[in-house]
Image (cartoon, rainbow, N blue to C red):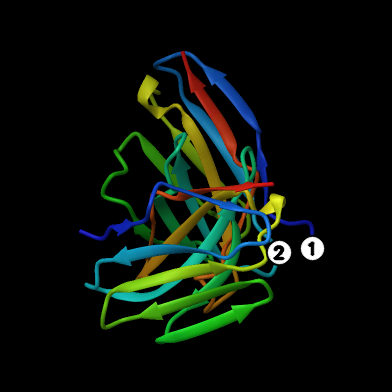
Amino acid sequence: GQSLEQPSEVTAVEGAIVQINCTYQTSGFYGLSWYQQHDGGAPTFLSYNALDGLEETGRFSSFLSRSDSYGYLLLQELQMKDSASYFCAGSYGQNFVFGPGTRLSVLP
Amino acid sequence: DTGVSQDPRHKITKRGQNVTFRCDPISEHNRLYWYRQTLGQGPEFLTYFQNEAQLEKSRLLSDRFSAERPKGSFSTLEIQRTEQGDSAMYLCASSQPGQGYEQYFGPGTRLTVT
């Protein structure tokens, strides 16, 4: 089947850099998206990688390595408001599979 | 652009009853998705429409679940004979043609089955 794996929790301090990893199954895989979800809120789109390499969007960057079936989300200059759950999501044809999510806690 | 809207926001029903949820996508988005999310988990894909055509349906979706998008605009998700295990947040999302990787989510409908 199609499944993605992420660490369940990450903790970092304000101003730091944090990396959230995601591994995925390759069969039928097209690309990897990242979403942020605050408690009680809806997921919001952050970034997408279809090709190997780094995509940068402000303080957030996302990376994909197809040969390693691996990607990560990099958050720089962490702010308190970045405390949220982060989901990687694989595109598999018409199907989209979300990972279990990584809960990021940013400490002062 | 008013975003994706869902109605109702909350629904409490008794086991065995039928419920129907509505989703209004962003107007220029031709793709519409339904997901189910339980606490501490990622959204679970249920089904996907391109315009009025239902192109994909999760094998996890039992025959008690049905979705429609009759005119290619709003969509409804119906759950028949609800069970306590159906209690969850039901999320709708939409995307532009060719950009399914960038989905815009609505606020969700929280279903509680008692």
Circle on res. B1:
1
- Protein chain holding label 2: B
> Considering depth in this image, is A64 or A3 the residue closer to the camera?
A64
Q: Earlier in the sequence, mark 2 or mark 1?
A: 1
Q: Amino acid at mark 1?
A: Asp
Q: CA distance from mark 2 to mark 1?
A: 8 Å
Q: Residue at x 31, y 65 (%)?
A: A23
Q: Which residue is mark 2?
A: B27
- Output the chain of dot 1: B
| Residue A21 in the image: above or below residue A85 | below
State the residue at coordinates (63%, 37%). A40
Disc 1 packing (10 Å; few <14; some 14–19; many ≥20): few
The percent position of residue A53, horizontal first and vertical second, equals: 44, 86
In terms of secondary structure, where does tag 2 sit? loop
Q: Quadrant of the N terminus of chain A?
A: bottom left
Residue A36: x %, y % from top left: 58, 56
Contact (Cβ within 8 Å) of mark 2 with mark 1: yes
Left or right: A16, with A72 as reference point: right
Which structural element holds mark 1? loop
